Amino acid sequence: MATWHTGRLLVAMPVLEDPTFARAVVLLIDHDEDGALGVVLNRASEVPVTEATDRLLDLVPAPDVLFGGGPVEPEAVVAIGRAHDDAVRSETTFVEGLRLVDLDQDPVLAGVELTQVRLFAGYAGWAPGQLEHELWNGAWAVVDSEPSDVFTPRPETLWRDVLARQSGRLRLLADYPADVHLN
């Protein structure tokens, strides 16, 4: 029986050397028998958010740039928002307090009061069974997410920060050197 991980984080393990995902922290937006979809949370670009939209700019926390959400459809923009009322759930809510935001619709008119929004160029996707295979091979650790992970002001330390709050062996990896050959 499969275990679905929607709303949880995938943390790249040191064995995952593909530069696209090395030391990546991915928030899974959807994971089921049809595959998985998520966004990489710790790949801030230098592209200002205004390149994607002028809407909701006052809700974008620092750094106020587009994030590289993943290699799939890099021209597409995925927006994740934190709702003012974390208890409100809808079809766009994938984890408590977090929801997908339609950039073409005014969230206030849709009855949603957002406190923060993060924008991602592209996303990460896995075909049916592909993520499960990668998990079985030890490429990723699955850990609980916190809404603040999406909106961290220091995305460059998110991989280490997420691992440091874990227990056991995962916690030890927080201090794993970026290049073991220099150790």
Image (cartoon, helix red, strand yellow):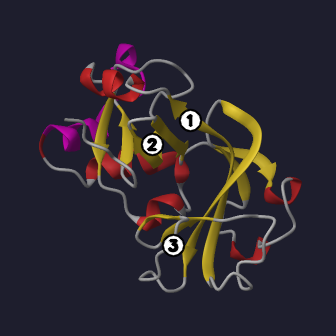
Q: Is residue 24 visible?
A: no
Kind of residue indicated by mark 2: Val
Q: Quadrant of the C terminus?
A: top left
Ranked by sequence position, the earlier of labels 3 and 2 is 2
Q: Quick check: 13 left or right of 36?
A: left
Point out the frontmost of discs 2 and 1.
1
Point out the frontmost of discs 3 and 1.
3
- Image: magenta residue range: 169-183
Figure quadrant of residue 122: top right
Q: Secondary structure at mark 2?
A: strand
Return the x and y of residue 170 as percentages of the image width and height: 21, 40
Residue at 62 percent of width and 42 percent of height: 69
Pointers 3 and 2 in contact (C-beta within 8 Å): no
Task: Please rate how many residues cluster around mark 2, counting C-alpha atoms within 10 Å: few if below 14, some from 14 to 19, many from 20.
Answer: many
The front one of 31 and 179 is 31
The numbered mark at residue 25 is: 2
Residue at 37 percent of width and 13 percent of height: 181
Q: Quick check: 7 left or right of 79?
A: left
Return the x and y of residue 87 as percentages of the image width and height: 41, 83
Q: Which residue is mark 1?
A: 124
Q: Quadrant of the N terminus?
A: top left
Farthest-out residue, top: 181
Q: Main secondary structure of the magenta part?
A: helix
Point out the frontmost of discs 3 and 2.
3
Return the x and y of residue 25 as percentages of the image width and height: 45, 42
Cα distance between the residues tagged 2 and 1: 11 Å
Cα distance between the residues tagged 3 and 1: 23 Å
Farthest-out residue, left: 168
Ranked by sequence position, the earlier of labels 3 and 1 is 3
Q: Which residue is mark 3?
A: 90
Kind of residue indicated by mark 3: Ser
